[in-house]
Image: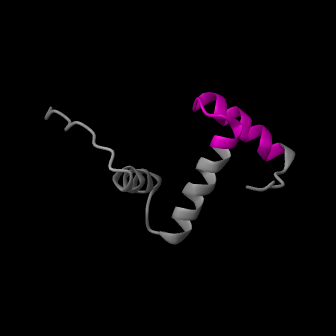
Amino acid sequence: MGIVKIDDALHEEIRRASTVMCRSINAQAEFWMKIGMFAEANPTFTFNDIVKARFAAAHVRFPEAAAP
C-alpha cells in the first residue's frame, strides 16, 4: 500500500462521487482506477461491458429479466 498524489480538484470530485455511490473516498478512487485499467486493456469495451465482465469474473449471478 502506498500514497498516491491526487490533485485537490480531482479529490473533491472523488469525495462527491463517493457520497453518491455509498463508498469511502478511497474505495471510490480504487473503483475508478480499476475501471480505468480494465478500459485501457480493453479499449473496445463500453463501461457497461466492463462492469458486466467484472461481475462475471466475480461469479455474480443476476436473476433473469422477465419478458415485457
Q: Position of residue 64 (x, y in %)?
A: 19, 38
Q: Residue furthest front?
A: 1
- Left or right: 30 with respect to 64? right
Q: Quadrant of residue 12?
A: top right
Nearest the viewer among 15 and 57 is: 57
Residue lying at 55% horizontally and 55% vertically, measured from the top left: 35
Q: Which quadrant does the N terminus fall into?
A: bottom right
| Magenta segment boundaries in residue numbering | 9-27
Q: Position of residue 25 (x, y in %)?
A: 70, 38
Residue lying at 84% horizontally and 50% vertically, measured from the top left: 7
- Left or right: 35 with respect to 44? right
Image: 52 above or below 18: below
Nearest the viewer among 25 and 59 is: 59
Main SS of the magenta segment?
helix
Q: Position of residue 31 (x, y in %)?
A: 59, 48
Residue lying at 67% horizontally and 47% vertically, measured from the top left: 29
Q: Position of residue 55 (x, y in %)?
A: 38, 49
Nearest the viewer among 1 and 49 is: 1
